Amino acid sequence: MDYPRVPPNITQECGPVAWLDFYNWNENLNSDQISTSNVTWAEPQRQLACISWLEALAQTHGLVPSSLRIASADASFRRYLRVDTQAGASLIVMDAPPDKENCEPFVKVAKLMQLAGLKAPEVLAWQEAQGFMLLTDLGDQTMMSAIDVKNSQANHALYMQAVDALIAWQLSSKAGVLPSYDEALLNRELSLFPDWYLAQHRQIDVQGKIRNTLDSTFKMLVTRNLASPSVFVHRDFMPRNLMMPTGSDAALGVLDFQDAVYGPVTYDVASLMRDAFLTWEEDFVLDVTIRYWEKARKAGLLDFEDWHQDFGVFYRAVEWMGLQRHLKVAGIFARLTLRDGKEKYLADAPRFIAYIRSTAARYIELRPLLRLIEEVEGKDGVTGFAFGRM
């Protein structure tokens, strides 16, 4: 498990983009905190509690408590430690103070993923009162670290593995198990764009025609996205949260799943192919998305209207779902920079603005949004590969 890359947990409002603090959490650690030979504790009592807990587990799990060291630390209050076993392997210790972090969603979703046949960390022990958890270690190499960013086709097999994992996760879905990705949450996320990107970052008075354009666009997005069949949604299914296979196990590992919900089937494939950290050419995006569509329809996941026989209709739904995510993320980038003083985020906002412009340029209903974005960004309109119905 690539815990040095595990991003921090944020509130449910920002849950699906918890990875956004990836850029900054390393910088928030001092030299003592990132030592590989010891672990710094803010409270001596918590250190004693952890060591005592590990010693109690040492015989059962073959632990070597003295080997405890930093694996990663969150910008919030959660961090991960690595501990060796007498057999020469390693396990992960989650340190999450219960007054600041809720581990129940992690435990619940990890179990759901394992039941679905996915390779997720197994919870070996949980000291709920103290907020300590012993987990299996999925290694230290993410799918992202193995990607050849200069040659998309060289990564095709990896993306097919990711698609297979996603299909398995979606097939295990049941209503009423995870929180619903409902109208209220979708709208709350969308409001981040006008509130923070437009009003705070661009200093635009979001009233009148601008407000009307956004309101009508958001209403269309929410209505169409909620019409999609619902499945389990990881909410951040992308290469940085997928771990490379280890040993004889050929499956990709899955991390950062604690904010999973029950919502649109289109969300995770949109997240996978419209990555927060890299942008693929459209023919590669279409290739992988078509292969997902073929597998998903055979599995019975797309028995909705004519999705199962018309890829263009399905791809439109994926794009509209992705548009909701990109508007939200642009708002969060602005908020993290302007409110939280994390200046690097807005430097990456252009990737998401480009996603927004490209999608809005394809569909007649989204042309008002495109004109708004072009006015805000001061750029000429863009055209894209117009796959799907206009």
Image: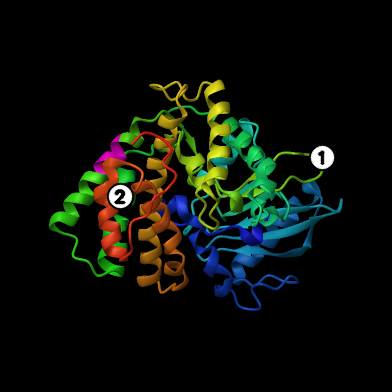
Horizontal side, residue 385 vs residue 296: left or right: left
Q: Which residue is mark 1?
A: 248
- Alpha carbon separation for disc pair 1 and 2: 44 Å
Q: In the rendered view of the protein, which quadrant contains the C terminus?
A: top left
Query: What's the residue at 81%, 44% (across, down)?
Result: 247
Decide: is 312 above or below 197: above
Instruction: Please tell me whether the stretch drawn in magenta is mainly helix, strand or loop.
Output: helix
Q: Amino acid at mark 1?
A: Ser
Colour logic: rainbow
The spot of residue 8 in percent (x, y) is: 52, 59
- Is residue 150 or residue 71 the one in the foreground? 150
- Taking the magenta stretch, the answer to whether it contains residue 6 is no
Magenta residues span 218-223
Horizontal side, residue 369 vs residue 3: left or right: left
The spot of residue 97 in percent (x, y) is: 53, 59
Query: What's the residue at 41%, 22% (across, down)?
Result: 304
Tell me the SS state at disc 1: loop
Q: Which residue is mark 2?
A: 188
- Is residue 313 or residue 387 the one in the foreground? 387
- Is residue 25 or residue 102 the one in the foreground? 25
Q: Amino acid at mark 2?
A: Arg
Query: What's the residue at 44%, 51% (across, down)?
Result: 15
- Residue furthest to the bottom: 31
- Is residue 249 or residue 73 the one in the foreground? 249
The spot of residue 361 in percent (x, y) is: 34, 48
Q: How many marks?
A: 2
Tell me the SS state at disc 2: helix
- Taking the magenta stretch, the answer to whether it contains residue 220 is yes
